[in-house]
């Protein structure tokens, strides 16, 4: 049975309800996977794509009914040697496993919570270049402890991440501040509670400080952030796609692939 938020696709399995903005996210994911998996082929015999919140593998645009491949099916098109897809929802994981099996039976689908897997050391890859896609529906699904463990467990990892700042941070700024002693999504995301002492003018300023603090914490682990790309819905910012890596090559690749947007238009850099 699918939940009310899920749609049934033409293949009879559940799809993820999406807006047309999903094209922009998938465009950058597709291009980054392509340039990295192919460009690093000679240097890294083992190239792992890790999708920690993979979804069902198919997105359906709600108002048009159009079906588009989700991040796992996009990554399967590229020259990785290993794929690991994690999805906590059993119905979505089952749909994903069926779709993935048709394309590449070697790819692994795991139905579990990624934070639990990472804490057990199950997401450490030896002698491999890892491209990890961290694509939550909210910031609470990316606890700092789990992200930090993922980064520390992999020597060579690029993390492509969607940061759900509009709903997750800006809109909730006042709720967070009023939360006092409670554990909030923001405490989870930043892995600290000191933000309660910050001074800020408005919710946008608060959001900027949260993002700056997050980038600072990534830098403390030697992960440099590349230029963030904003994804908008109906002219309003929704989230940003950010790339983090310890290696300058990642940024070099990112700069190349962001030159053109999902419509083939030059991006204003
Ligand atoms: C934004 S969707 C992923 C969309 C997919 N990356 C794509 O582009 O096609 C996020 C998914 O993460 C799953 N999820 C949420 N928390 C999770 C967790 N802790 N571990 C694994 N999956 C999780 C949700 O069920 C949802 O399907």
Image (cartoon, rainbow, N blue to C red):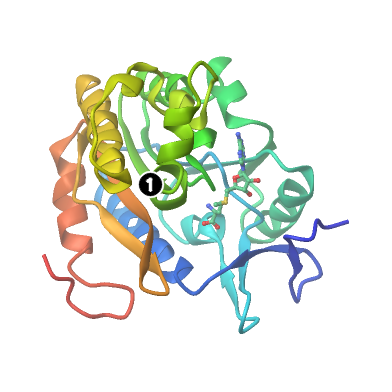
Picture quarter with the C terminus: bottom left
Q: Is residue 143 visible?
A: no
Res 68 → quadrant: bottom right
Depth check, front residue: 253 or 196: 196
User: Circle 1: is it few (<14), some (14-19), or many (20+) Cα within 10 Å?
Assistant: some
User: Residue 184, percent across and down?
Assistant: 52, 27
Left or right, residue 212 beside residue 32: left
Answer above or below: position of 186 versus 220: below
Left or right, residue 65 beside residue 188: right
Left or right, residue 144 beside residue 14: left
Answer above or below: position of 101 versus 218: below
Depth check, front residue: 207 or 268: 207
Residue at position x 48%, y 23% from top?
A: 146
Picture quarter with the N terminus: bottom right
Depth check, front residue: 184 or 76: 184
Residue at position x 80%, y 56% from top?
A: 3
Depth check, front residue: 4 or 205: 205
Tally of marks = 1
**Is disc 1 placed on a helix, strand or loop?**
helix
Q: Is residue 206 visible?
A: yes
Left or right, residue 183 beside residue 205: right
- Identify the residue under disc 1: 170
User: Residue 15, percent across and down?
Assistant: 69, 64
């Amino acid at each position: 049975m699918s939940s009310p938020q899920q749609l049934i696709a033409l293949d009879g399995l559940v799809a993820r309800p999406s807006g047309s903005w999903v094209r922009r996210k998938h465009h950058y994911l597709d291009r980054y996977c392509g340039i990295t998996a192919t460009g690093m082929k000679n240097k890294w015999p083992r190239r792992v794509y890790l999708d920690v919140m993979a979804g069902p593998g198919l997105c359906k645009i709600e108002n048009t009914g159009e079906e588009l491949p989700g991040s796992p099916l996009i990554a399967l098109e590229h020259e990785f040697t290993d794929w690991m897809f994690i999805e906590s929802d059993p119905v979505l994981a089952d749909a994903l496993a069926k779709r993935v099996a048709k394309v590449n039976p070697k790819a692994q689908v795991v139905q579990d919570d990624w934070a639990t897997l990472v804490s057990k050391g199950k997401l450490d890859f030896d002698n491999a270049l890892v491209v990890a896609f961290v694509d939550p529906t909210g910031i609470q699904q990316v606890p700092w402890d789990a992200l930090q463990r993922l980064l520390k467990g992999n020597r060579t990892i690029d993390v492509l991440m969607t940061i759900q700042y509009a709903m997750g941070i800006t809109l909730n700024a006042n709720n967070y501040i009023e939360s006092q002693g409670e554990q909030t999504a923001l405490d989870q995301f930043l892995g600290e509670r000191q933000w309660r002492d910050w001074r800020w003018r408005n919710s946008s300023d608060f959001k900027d400080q949260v993002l700056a603090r997050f980038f600072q914490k990534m830098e403390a682990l030697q992960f440099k952030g590349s230029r963030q790309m904003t994804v908008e819905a109906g002219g309003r910012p929704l989230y940003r796609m950010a790339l983090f890596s310890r290696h300058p090559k990642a940024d070099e690749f990112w700069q190349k692939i962001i030159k053109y947007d999902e419509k083939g238009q030059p991006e204003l850099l």
